[in-house]
Image (cartoon, rainbow, N blue to C red):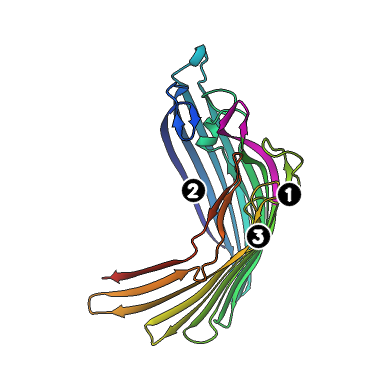
Amino acid sequence: MRGHFSAGFDLDGQYISDWRYPNLGNAVEGTTLLSDQAIHQNREGGYLSGRVNFGEKWTALAGVRFDRIGNTLDDHLKANGLDLSGSRDFTHATGRVGLTYAPAKQVSLYASWGQGFLPPATEELYANPDALGGFNRRLVPATSQGAEGGVRGFVGNRFFYDTAFFHLSTANDFERYRIASRPLETFYGNAGNSSRYGLESSFRWLPVSRVTFTGAYTYSHFTYTEYTSNTYPGDLTGHWLPNSPMHQFSGDATFEFLRTYFFGLGIDAVSKAYVDPTNRPYIDGYGLLNSRISKTFQTRSASGTIFAMGRNLTGKRYIAFTEPDPDGNSYQPGATREVFGGIQFRF
């Protein structure tokens, strides 16, 4: 048996001064001071982790972590005699365990289980729907737990692979919403729970000298197991999570010629994805063709690379990013064609 153990801690903090004036719309700010507050934040975290090898084939790992995130707000304005000062502290312990088994030099099996903890972010916490200032006291941290198992290895020093199945359950996922009395502000709440499972795989193949093929594929099945929304009407349980395409693939081929020249050709492809939890608006899937060429050089005192690369060479029109928003969903188009070039020196 051989073991490796480690322990550590981290401390950090920040101070935020916040003044707010009314949003009159059309990027115009009013002059009435609505809130004047100071926010002190600090975090203390500590962890213990260990890895033990049982002979040459078995490896076990385990870890535990504890976090405390403290938020204190001082209300300097105290509008109408109401003091909104207060604090919100979030503490949580998480753990992880895993096991690896290598029956042969060329293959390894692995499995692990772990937990996650996501406290409200600063913006989410001080966007208070109940008052002009102070902390949102409705929010609770989001948590998760999940497991994965897979196999990785190689065949004949020419083919390398890694495939894993995963499942993740989340609770108290966050969402954004608005209220009628303050329609130009965005607030945050815990809306639901989800189940996420799928497959991740990658490979690297060297069929002959100076030729390399690589690829990666992800299958994602992400749905809500419970969803109580402040924004969307109806029961959204069973709906797909937004911005989560079911299929994603990336492939690349690299060719070396004349010893110092390299040419690469690649593709990035995703299937359609829903824009918000109603699963009505969606964006179509797309595929992008990319390429690159480079030349390496060597002198007595330096070496370097000259390169040129292009992305989306066919000029495909596509939506690169979407975002559900209570004020209207956001759609961000991707660049139709991009070309880059450069030179690197190493002395």
Q: Which mark is residue 239?
A: 1
Amino acid on which the number 3 mark rests in the picture? Lys
In the rendered image, the quadrant that contains the C terminus is bottom left
Looking at the picture, how far across and down is residue 290, in whole percent? Answer: 50, 71
Look at the image and tell me whether residue 12 can be seen: yes
Q: In the displayed image of the protein, which residue is found farthest to the top?
A: 81
- Do residues under tags 2 and 1 come within 8 Å of each other at their CB atoms? no
Amino acid on which the number 2 mark rests in the picture? Ala
Q: Which residue is mark 2?
A: 7
Query: Residue at coordinates 74% horizontally, 43% vertically from top-left?
Result: 226
Amino acid on which the number 1 mark rests in the picture? His
Circle 2: is it few (<14), some (14-19), or many (20+) Cα within 10 Å?
few
Q: Nearer the viewer, residue 93 or 258?
A: 258
Q: Main secondary structure of the magenta part?
A: strand
Say which label, 2 or 1, has the lower sequence index: 2
Q: Which residue is mark 3?
A: 272
Q: Nearer the viewer, residue 113 or 211?
A: 211
In the rendered image, the quadrant that contains the N terminus is bottom right
